[in-house]
Image (cartoon, coloured by chain):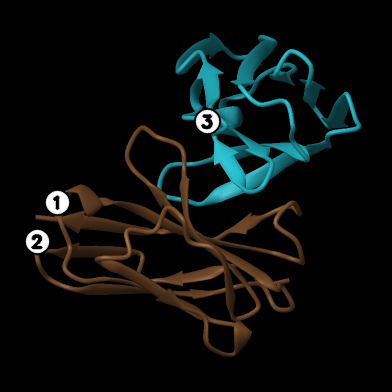
Chain colours: A brown, B cyan
Amino acid sequence: EAGVAQSPRYKIIEKRQSVAFWCNPISGHATLYWYQQILGQGPKLLIQFQNNGVVDDSQLPKDRFSAERLKGVDSTLKIQPAKLEDSAVYLCASSHVTGTDTQYFGPGTRLTVL
Amino acid sequence: KQEVTQIPAALSVPEGENLVLNCSFTDSAIYNLQWFRQDPGKGLTSLLLIQSSQREQTSGRLNASLDKSSGRSTLYIAASQPGDSATYLCAVISNQFYFGTGTSLTVIP
């Protein structure tokens, strides 16, 4: 079974620039999550999708972050404009059905904002 | 809001030693608790999932326990190996996943 795929693996941008991350979940997984992991901290949920609908985006900074999951499969997370404090690893995860099922994580995208 | 704490933040042990990692949480109304391993530059790998009705789960040299009433979970690693070196994260699952800050484990050959 193929795992969760993410790209790019690394990204360096200057503040105020825009950036987008892509995630392809495990086939058949209805639930998709985006997490932000700042160095030395645990992952923090940004947004959770069930198929192509948003279940929870309460911790997503909506003034600069946006995410979509078209057709209930792939997802993109965008930051526009980026700030220095957005430097982190962005992890995508998927689970079979509900939010309480085991989550499978991708390798993450390491973002550095200069 | 659920808060998850992991102690110690870092641990270094000689190979072969048994060790315990601790996880505590503030709200006992949880569905499940899950332990993950994170290697540098990689995503999280699930180790054990304990449902709220269970008290422990075992997989190989790993044993995780859960005491909901006291808001605690422990991950026991037997006969540690250098390949166990990684960061171990616990996640408490209620309406969403709440992660601790992790314990960085180094097993010295």
Query: Position of A18 compared to B20: left or right?
Result: left
Under circle 2, the secondary element is loop
Chain under disc 3? B
Q: Amino acid at mark 3?
A: Gly
| Contact between labelled residues 2 and 1, with CB atoms less than 8 Å apart | yes
**Chain of residue at mark 2:** A
Q: Are marks 3 and 2 on the same chain?
A: no
- Please give the residue where the numbered disc 1 appears in the rendered image: A84
Q: Are marks 3 and 2 in contact (CB under 8 Å)?
A: no
The numbered mark, 1 or 2, whose residue comes first in the sequence reads 2
Q: Which residue is rendered at x = 74% and y = 78% of the image?
A: A28
Q: Residue A73 sits in which quadrant?
A: bottom right
Circle 3 residues within 10 Å: few <14, some 14–19, many ≥20: many
Q: Are marks 1 and 2 on the same chain?
A: yes
**Alpha-carbon distance for marks 3 and 2?**
29 Å
Point out the residue furthest to the bottom here.
A71
Q: x, y (%) of residue B95?
A: 66, 47
Q: Residues within 10 Å of mark 2 (few under 14, many from 20)?
A: some
Q: Quadrant of the C terminus of chain A?
A: bottom left
Along the horizontal axis of the image, is B36 left or right of A7? right
Residue at point 39% right, 58% down? A60
Percent across and percent down for residue B94 are 69, 42
Label 3 element class: loop
Q: Is residue B109 visible?
A: no
A114 left or right, relative to B105: left
Q: What separation in Å lies between label 1 and label 2 (alpha carbons)?
A: 6 Å
Q: Amino acid at mark 2?
A: Lys
Q: Amino acid at mark 1?
A: Leu
Residue ID at (62%, 23%): B25
Residue linked to disc 2 = A15
Which residue in the structure is indicated by mark 3?
B100
